[in-house]
Amino acid sequence: MSKGETEGSALKSLIDDGRVHVMDGAMGTELYASGVFVNVSYDGLNLETPEIVENVHRNYVNAGAEIIETNTFGANPVKLSSYGLADRTEEINRAAVELARRGAQGRALVVGAIGPLGIRIEPLGPTSREEAQEFYHRQVDGLVEGGVDGFVLETFSDLNELEQAFKAVRSRSSLPVMCQVTVGEDCCTSYGTSPEDVATTVTAWGADVIGINCSVGPAVMLDAVERMAEVTDLPLSAQPNAGLPRAVGDRKIYLASPDYMAQYARRMIEAGARFVGGCCGTSPEHIRSIRALVGGQRPPSTRVRPGSHAEPHDTPIQPDVPLGERSAWGRKIAEGSFVTSIEITPPKGWDPEDLLEQCRRIQTAGADTVNVLDHPQAQARMSALPAAMLIQREVGIEPIVHYPCRDRNMTRMISDLLGAAAAGLHNLLLVTGRPPTTGPYPDSTASLDIDSIGLTNVVHGLNRGVDPGGNAIGVPTRFVIGARVNQVAVDQDREAGRLKWKVDAGIDFVITQPVFDAGRLHAFLALLPDVSLPMVASLRPLTSLREAEFLHNEVPGIHIPEEIMARMAEAEQGGEEAARAEGVRIALEVFESIRDSIAGAHVHVPDGNLDGALEVLSGVVDRL
């Protein structure tokens, strides 16, 4: 048995003794106050400037902390890779334990701090649960080698990820594990998981302590602790921030006083907490006040209401509404009818009249739907959602909303889509989205919370009446979910694999990138013998040789064969109209060659050439 495993019995004794114990406060804000810049790896300081880290630990122990956390919140290989330190994961964690031991001077126990990876894992991201556990294994191995007394898994929002961290610890060690989530002002995680569901779920895993840390101040955390205490008899922990940060000049300052923090620590103990401390903004002075007021107390002996012993809570998942009942587009797909759509771009201004007139022409031409783009090429335009609402209300043709994940966090996307469902929009084309560097705003930035696969899982859940936190949303949504596929991707196996993940996530149809080479599409489809999903092929009538050259050389996902380039060059000699007519002919020839392999046609409108797009649509309809 290792040193850590032997000393782990000391932490188990604290967990079992029924008394209140004081943990430490913030590591990050104390390091910052020591003069460490924010653009360095705070975990890497365990190797680079160990004396600063050790001093923070010693100050907390001198203030009365009985349990201190290692400086390893972000010491996993994913986060360390941003600083070129992934290869030193085990070394950094091992050193962190040694520093904490020296700072503790035998007067406090040391727990290994483990935080989120900083990436989404399945079903909301590309990292599998097994991969996540492997990342955590490396951190746990370093902490165990260093000789920790136990572990604190903290600041998690996603219970799925917290479970992988917990499993990683349990596979490497039998030491006690404290599991802490972070919540918002509504006492729920950012995934919408309630304190009650956190407590019942984590209790079922076999954790030793359950708690909350970070994000909010003591007042909100007290509410969350009270709610946890009603459903579990496990010891609870509470480590709030020192209030919410206030902007003072160019700094964020936490203004909750030590006395205020101590008073709320006592209230949390009265609510059932047995391990109290602090998070962001909490200094040794805060911990000193907490220790002086509450150290060694006993919380109420009875917390759990009769009959409320922890049991995992499962929100009933409702079956999907049949595809044919979700929308007219979904009905045609379900019936096996050939479907048609035309892509439409919202205006750069707020006046929708030109957009609506184009949609009226498309409706008259017989298209099943219009596919409303969302600021293509990262240019600011009218948003696709209100544009689609206007089209459906004013024109009466059913739209498909092109919805990218770029620059939207998951909470905002859920809000958008619930609003879309309420407005009667039911067809979605979910895409990850291109970065804004392809647009005209060189100083803009992009963020990506989840990709199209993760969003498909979210929307599929909404269709079954639950949000990502497993909470019921009431009446399920009725979205018909579409996805993009790049049939000419350089890595064909990866693209086929991503499509299979999208199928598993719950998509109902696929739209290809513009098809100019039938052979490339057929070759891609051959990689998907087990995938039976309506494939809608994109057709784009070229308008000029210059456009063809631009698309082939500068737009990802488009491949134009040399023979088509030659045809456009020859046609252009007869003038612009001749080139446009040739572009239409090429699109219809491509359609003829892939007709038996597809379930629909989606026509692009290049450079505002709606006439050309309508001509292609007419030709497609005539050939059915």
Image (cartoon, rainbow, N blue to C red):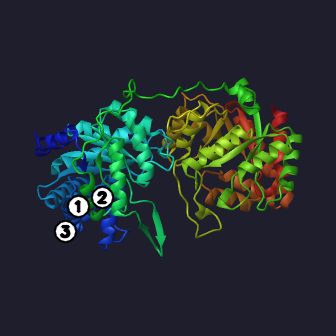
- Numbered tag placed on residue 25 in the rendering: 2
How many other residues sit within 10 Å of disc 1, few (<14), some (14-19) or many (≥20)?
many
Give left or right: position of 107 versus 72: left
**Foreground residue among 89 and 99:** 99
**Foreground residue among 262 and 186:** 262
The Cα–Cα distance between marks 2 and 3, rounded to whole angstroms, is 18 Å
Say what amino acid the circle numbered 2 marks: Gly
Q: Quadrant of residue 548?
A: bottom right
Q: Are marks 1 and 2 in contact (CB under 8 Å)?
A: yes
**Rendered residue at 48%/44% (across/down):** 188
Mark earlier in primary sequence (1, 2): 2
**Foreground residue among 121 and 528:** 121
The Cα–Cα distance between marks 3 and 1, rounded to whole angstroms, is 14 Å
Q: Is the N terminus in the top left, top right, bottom left or bottom right quadrant?
A: top left
Q: Are marks 3 and 1 in contact (CB under 8 Å)?
A: no
Give left or right: position of 328 versus 597: right
- Numbered tag placed on residue 51 in the rendering: 3
Which is in the foreground here, disc 3 or disc 1? 1
- Residue position marked by numbered label 1 in the rendering: 60
**Rendered residue at 68%/33% (across/down):** 598
Mark earlier in primary sequence (2, 3): 2
- Give the answer, above or below, for where 434 lies relative to 459: below
Residue 97 is at least partly visible in this image? yes
Q: Secondary structure at mark 2?
A: loop
